[in-house]
Image (cartoon, rainbow, N blue to C red):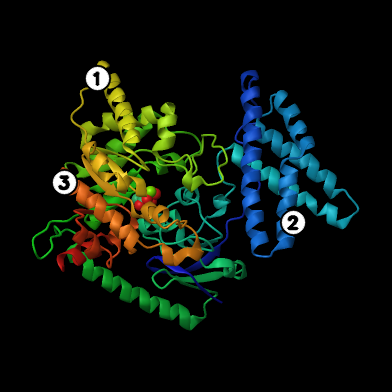
């Protein structure tokens, strides 16, 4: 069977299929203290709300595509999640000092057993639904998706409806040979992660994925956007041949890894890497990164179930700073929300998370999260050339407020005797508002970095992860280019550099356009660096 979708990360792979099962999670703890009862009950209510919110979205989607029967199943799940009897059984257990996750799993099991014992075949089969939904509530309580990746033990091709950043962040290195997902586009986070990890990916194959879930083996061509289930011998041999050719093509780009990219009229373009974790730093240097144009710090928060401490963050930021020495490293403050959930923090369900409490909005509202991060970054500046960047800024007030918090963090550290040098602060231009207000923002910024992934999504009102909106997911659109031009002109007038750290920066056909608009730095998933340098050198 052939599945076609978007070639989201180039490369070829053939391997066993792995389908993550959303199994029942184990409780992290079984007991709580008296003090934790009230917060525990509130957490349980929030978790129910979040699960029901997610289910409502699924139900709406199914109804729209005419799948009434399936919608009915999920409606039952939603009813079950909100069942008052389930709630009182859980509350009773929590009041008896069971942890909310243990309580919901146990109460769910009791309920399921009740259904399973029924004579009516239909009702007996509802036991699994009860287990499923209470498992989801428990997973939500523990701040993680019930992802089932624990069972991934050998290098495999991962097939899934969608992959959240917290899923990809949890997959052990080397175990994912390729990703194939029903949903997603080139700029959804699974694609971004796949590119920076050098893992081939085909996303947005749609409902065809369901027919592939029983496959033993899958061959993936991430360049063409093609996956073949249970390939025959000839196909495997063809993939082997193509792999050799790709390896040769990559080897031919090697000579560009460590050149300083310059256009033929002498314009120097810095080519940097986007990193999701400190462990990628060495690899990125090997690909020829001249700095880090975007360190996505949220992944540090996502690959675990609790929040990293200030010291843990300091260690991660210092490690990147040290690895890059004098080369600039732009650390972006936490950008969660949208499709990036934060395990360890209760997030309320939002109807439109991409238009919701995300990026700088959340950071400014949660000093307990933001201040330790700012302190950790400032402390790490002594190890290299770190700069700070704020995401999702919509106006100059937000930028000023963020800078004020940075100054407060600095003052606190200096009072404690920590000596700090100058730290440049910059802003992401990823909302249309930021591009339109670029002149004002430039007065308060040492640099701009254009986040084309979100800029495209918000300008064209096209969800970056929706596989049906491919035509509207490219920065090569007159409206987006006009906003990029506006930002570049404002930056030029203010005499500050302007980079691009969205995926367009690594796309060979976009690079000439970005440079002609005035962009001076390109930052991308590290494996794309040699090709980008070649493109620049040939301009
Ligand atoms: C962007 O929006 O272009 C960007 C680089 O940020 P992220 O992809 O992390 O949202
Ligand atoms: Mg963004």
Q: Which of marks 2 and 1 precedes in the sequence?
A: 2
Q: Position of residue 61 (x, y in %)?
A: 62, 58
Q: Nearer the viewer, residue 13 or 463?
A: 463
Q: Is residue 97 visible?
A: yes
- Locate residue 317 relative to residue 260 in the image: left or right: right
In the rendered image, is residue 23 in sight? no
In the image, what residue occupies the spot 41% across and 29% down? 309
Q: Are marks 1 and 2 in contact (CB under 8 Å)?
A: no
Q: Secondary structure at mark 1?
A: helix
| Residue 88 sits in quarter | top right
Give the SS element for disc 3: helix
Label 1: few (<14), some (14–19) or many (≥20) C-alpha neighbours in 10 Å: few
Q: Is residue 262 left or right of residue 234?
A: left
Residue situated furthest right in the rendering: 119
Residue 237 horizontal/vertical position (percent): 43, 80
Category of crowding for the residue at label 3, using alpha-carbon neighbours closer than 10 angstroms: few (below 14), some (14–19), many (at least 20): few
Q: Is residue 422 left or right of residue 472?
A: left
Label 3 CB less than 8 angstroms from ligand 1: no
Give the residue at mark 3: 493
Establish if 224 lies above or below 432: below
In the depicted structure, whether residue 193 falls above or below residue 378? below
CB within 8 Å, label 1 to label 3: no
Tell me the quadrant of the picture where the N terminus can be found.
Answer: bottom right
How many angstroms separate mark 1 from mark 3 (CA)? 34 Å
Mark drawn on residue 49: none
Marks 3 and 2, how far apart at CA: 58 Å
Disc assigned to residue 72: 2
Q: Residue at x 53, y 47 (%)?
A: 352
Q: Do residues under tags 3 and 2 come within 8 Å of each other at their CB atoms?
A: no
Q: Label 1: which residue?
A: 414
């Amino acid at each position: 069977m052939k599945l076609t979708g978007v070639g989201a990360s180039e490369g070829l792979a053939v391997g066993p299929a792995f389908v993550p099962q959303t199994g029942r999670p184990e409780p992290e703890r079984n007991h709580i203290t008296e003090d934790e009862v009230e917060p525990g009950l509130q957490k349980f209510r929030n978790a129910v709300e979040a699960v029901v919110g997610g289910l409502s979205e699924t139900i709406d989607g199914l109804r729209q595509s005419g799948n009434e029967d399936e919608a009915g199943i999920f409606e039952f799940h939603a009813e079950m999640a909100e069942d008052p009897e389930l709630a009182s059984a859980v509350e009773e257990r929590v009041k008896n000092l069971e942890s909310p996750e243990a309580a919901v799993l146990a109460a769910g099991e009791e309920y399921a057993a009740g259904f399973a014992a029924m004579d009516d075949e239909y009702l007996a089969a509802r036991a699994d639904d009860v287990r499923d939904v209470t498992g989801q509530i428990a997973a939500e309580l523990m701040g993680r998706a019930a992802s089932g990746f624990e069972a991934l033990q050998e290098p495999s091709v991962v097939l899934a409806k969608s992959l959240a950043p917290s899923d990809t962040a949890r997959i052990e290195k080397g175990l994912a040979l390729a990703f194939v997902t029903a949903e997603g586009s080139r700029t959804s986070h699974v694609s971004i992660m796949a590119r920076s990890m050098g893992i081939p990916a085909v996303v947005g194959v749609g409902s065809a994925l369901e027919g592939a879930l029983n496959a033993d083996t899958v061959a993936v061509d991430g360049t063409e956007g093609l996956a073949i289930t249970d390939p025959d011998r000839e196909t495997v041999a063809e993939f082997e041949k193509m792999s050799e050719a790709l390896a040769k093509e990559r080897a031919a780009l090697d000579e560009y890894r460590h050149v300083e990219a310059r256009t033929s009229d002498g314009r120097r373009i810095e080519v940097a890497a986007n990193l999701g974790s400190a462990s990628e730093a060495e690899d990125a240097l090997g690909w020829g990164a001249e700095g880090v144009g975007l360190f996505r710090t949220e992944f540090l928060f996502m690959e675990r179930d609790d929040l990293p401490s200030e010291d843990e963050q300091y260690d991660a930021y210092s490690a990147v700073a040290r690895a890059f020495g004098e080369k600039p490293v732009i650390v972006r403050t936490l950008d969660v929300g949208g499709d990036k959930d934060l395990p360890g923090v209760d997030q309320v369900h939002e109807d439109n998370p991409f238009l919701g409490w995300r990026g700088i909005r959340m950071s400014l509202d949660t000093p307990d999260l933001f201040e330790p991060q700012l302190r950790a970054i400032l402390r790490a500046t002594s190890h290299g050339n770190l700069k700070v960047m704020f995401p999702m800024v919509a106006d100059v007030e937000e930028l000023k407020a963020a800078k004020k918090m940075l100054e407060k963090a600095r003052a606190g550290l200096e009072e404690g005797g920590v000596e700090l040098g100058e730290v440049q602060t910059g802003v992401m231009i990823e909302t249309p508002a930021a591009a339109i207000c670029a002149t004002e923002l430039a007065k308060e910024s040492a640099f701009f970095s254009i986040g084309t992934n979100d800029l495209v999504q918000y300008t064209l009102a096209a969800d970056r992860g929706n596989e049906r909106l491919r035509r509207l997911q490219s920065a090569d659109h007159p409206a987006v280019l006009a906003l990029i031009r506006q930002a570049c002109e404002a930056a030029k007038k203010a005499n500050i550099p302007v980079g691009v750290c969205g995926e367009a920066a690594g796309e060979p056909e976009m690079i000439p356009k970005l440079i002609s608009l005035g962009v001076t730095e390109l930052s991308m998933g590290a494996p794309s660096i040699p090709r980008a340098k070649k493109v620049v050198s040939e301009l």
